[in-house]
Amino acid sequence: MIYFLSDAHIGSRAMDDPQHQLRFVDLLMQLSQDATAIYLLGDIFDFWSEYVWPDKSKEEYRPLLDCLKSLTERGIEVHYFIGNHDIWTYGWLASQTGVTVHRHAEVTTIAGKQCLLAHGDGLVPHNYLEQFPKQVQKRIRSFMLLRALFHNPVAQTLFRIAPPAWGNKLGYNWAKRSRLKEMANPCGYKGENREELVLYAKEKDDERLQFKEKKSAIDYYIFGHRHIELDLELASGARVIILGDCFRQWTYAAMDEQGKLELLCIQEQNN
Ligand SMILES: [Mn+2]
């Protein structure tokens, strides 16, 4: 089996659950019994940043780091796509655990199926902004600017050379505010014509249809980020999967060797 999980937000200062990391580790260990590969699609940590200085605070994540290491040592491929909360890894996470880090959306063949995998932040269709009133456009633009800053190599270098205690204070507080905001005001599924990742997938489908000979059709678009569960079939037959999360909904996707994919919830597994 191949498993897809996202948005555990381990270490969040907004959630007071000392068992959270261990529950996630338990889930991974359970899945590892028949897993050949595990795809972690972003925001596994609520805030993850590596510095040029030693950072003892990472010991907090020892259970998960050891778990990931044990999975890769057993020959299970673990793919780690960065989200918007764990952008700042520069090799330490990979060297500690053996995971393969992916920094961008990728199309890859899994169990014979063409899959487009990404966390999902920043993926919007073309001319996306134009449909909104000026005020909303301004807000979206400032989010996009912040995202560009987070991905900017110069800003990243400056942040890396900061003392870890400062960087972490700033980062955990930013992540906490974003989590509290989201929990107080969760944004459910916006519908097929308004959900950014669905619109993005539809646009990609159209693009690929135009280049039929060169590019094969996508079977599954698999994303995290939105903390909603979605399994939607497009007109092309492709399916858009949004994974939910691993702190409130405890959902993930499983694909068998024939490429059949389903969304599951941890409760269903336990029963
Ligand atoms: Mn996210």
Image (cartoon, rainbow, N blue to C red):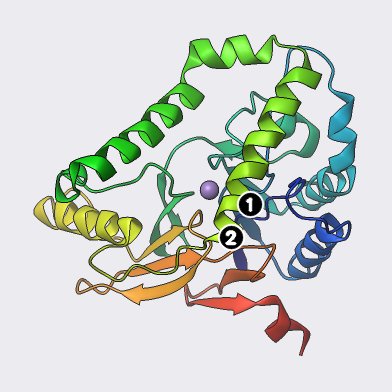
Give the answer, above or below, for where 164 lies relative to 267. above
Q: Residues within 10 Å of mark 2 (few under 14, many from 20)?
A: few
Q: Which quarter shows the N terminus?
A: bottom right
Q: Which amino acid does label 1 sit on?
A: Leu
Mark 2 residue element: helix
**Is the CB of the residue bearing disc 1 within 8 angstroms of ligand 1?**
no
Residue 213 seen in render = no
Tell me the number on the disc at residue 212.
Answer: none
Answer yes or no: is residue 224 visible. yes
**Number of marks in the rendered image:** 2
Viewer-proximal residue among 96 and 225:
225
What residue is shown at x 82% (from left), y 43% (from top)?
65
* Disc 2 to disc 1, C-alpha distance: 6 Å
Identify the residue at image location x=69%, y=44%. Answer: 45
Quarter that holds the C terminus: bottom right
Counting from the top left corner in percent of width and height, residue 172 is at: 71, 35
Residue bearing mark 2:
184
Residue 116 in which image quadrant:
bottom left
Q: Is residue 9 left or right of residue 204?
A: right
- Judged left or right of residue 122, residue 28 is right
Residue 230 shown left or right of residue 27 in the figure: left
Nearest the viewer among 226 and 99 is 226
Residue 158, image x, y percentages = 60, 9
Determine which residue is flagged by label 1: 180
Residue 91 drawn at (x, y percent): 67, 25
Given the image, on which type of amino acid does mark 2 rest?
Ala
